[in-house]
Image (cartoon, rainbow, N blue to C red):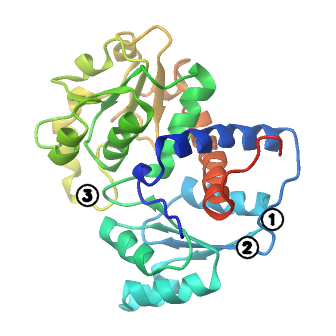
Amino acid sequence: MTRHFLTLLDLDRQELAYVLQRAQTLKSMHQQGTEYQPFKGKVLAMIFEKASTRTRVSFEAGMAHFGGHAIFLSPRDTQLGRGEPIEDSARVISRMCDVIMIRTYQHSNVERFAAASRVPVINALTDSYHPCQLLADLQTFQEHRGALAGKTFAWIGDGNNMCSSYIHAAHQCDFQLKIACPYGFEPDPALLQRFSDHVELVNSAEDAARDAHMVATDVWTSMGQENETSIRKRRFSAYQITPRLMDLADPDALFMHCLPAHRGEEVSEDMLDDSRSVVWDEAENRLHAQKALMEFLLLGAIGQST
């Protein structure tokens, strides 16, 4: 059966734990210069309807490390940009490629594409979820602080696709998630209700950060929301992450941001360079986590002695 990765819930808890562990193994192998190329002759199609730096570089570099090849496809390069039905594009591309990643707007588009695809489809970001970034975030926390279960994470800012994927992660990894958002920018109420045993909506950034083991945020205005920039800056002004806010967190707390960051908006000018910030490790781990994910989807679990 073809496996897809459209949200974190597409892996069960054991599979997710395996992928995170495998990501760290692959990172160690890469750092040691170990050649490992299980994807010789394999092709990844990368469909981008939203611009990206980290997503494109990490997937493309990962395929190169694995001995495979990646094809970059923008709306200008495909019939998708000219109105071809998503299902027809999926049927054709999946007959020519071994795995497909899509970065787009509507989550229903990746669901429709996956339903018609013969090969694994990976959600590299939609307006609803960003599961690949969560793999990197979870790997980074484990790398620096160990077990995820029983910890308290804080999400401060927009209740966006990242926040929704953090809600899934809290359920899958058994940690508590405190969410602080301005009124009107909360995450999907259905998600909050479904995962209420692991998620709490709090009243302020300070309430979320207090005693948290990890604090995360994202830009206040995402792609496609540019016409809301002014109002969002006003509404989110009390939700900026600063070293002073981080002082309310656990003494060993980490700070994460999926990047790109707008210094002086959702983060203070000095926050990314604070000793508690692990954003650069987090960005690098997109590479290793996605390699582990693609390996799992195409080859299944691999012995850790590899």
Residue 95: percent from left, percent from top: 60, 86
Q: Pointer 1 and pointer 2: residues touching (CB < 8 Å)?
A: yes
The residues bearing labels 3 and 1 have C-alpha atoms spaced at a distance of 38 Å
Residue 247: percent from left, percent from top: 39, 10
Point 16% across, 37% down: residue:
235
Which quadrant would residue 85 be assigned to in this image?
Answer: bottom left
Q: Pointer 3 and pointer 2: residues touching (CB < 8 Å)?
A: no
Does label 1 or label 2 sit earlier along the sequence?
A: 2
Q: Residues within 10 Å of mark 2 (few under 14, many from 20)?
A: some
Which quadrant would residue 297 be assigned to in this image?
Answer: bottom right
- Nearest the eye: 139 or 222: 139
The residues bearing labels 1 and 2 have C-alpha atoms spaced at a distance of 8 Å
Residue 221: mark in rendering: none
- Nearest the eye: 30 or 225: 30
From what the image shows, is residue 303 above or below residue 281? Answer: below
Residue 198: percent from left, percent from top: 29, 30
From what the image shows, is residue 287 above or below residue 265? Answer: below
Point 21% across, 44% down: residue:
187
Identify the residue position indicated by label 2 in the image. 42
Residue 225: mark in rendering: 3
As helix, strand or loop, the secondary structure at mark 2 comes to loop
Q: Is residue 191 visible?
A: yes
Please tell me whether mark 3 or mark 1 is closer to you in this view.
1
Residue 67: mark in rendering: 1
**Where, quadrant-wise, is the N terminus in this rendering?**
bottom right
Point 21% across, 35% down: residue:
236
As helix, strand or loop, the secondary structure at mark 3 comes to loop
Point 47% across, 16% down: residue:
253
Does label 3 or label 2 sit earlier along the sequence?
A: 2
Q: Residue furthest front?
A: 1
Which quadrant would residue 214 be assigned to in this image?
Answer: top left
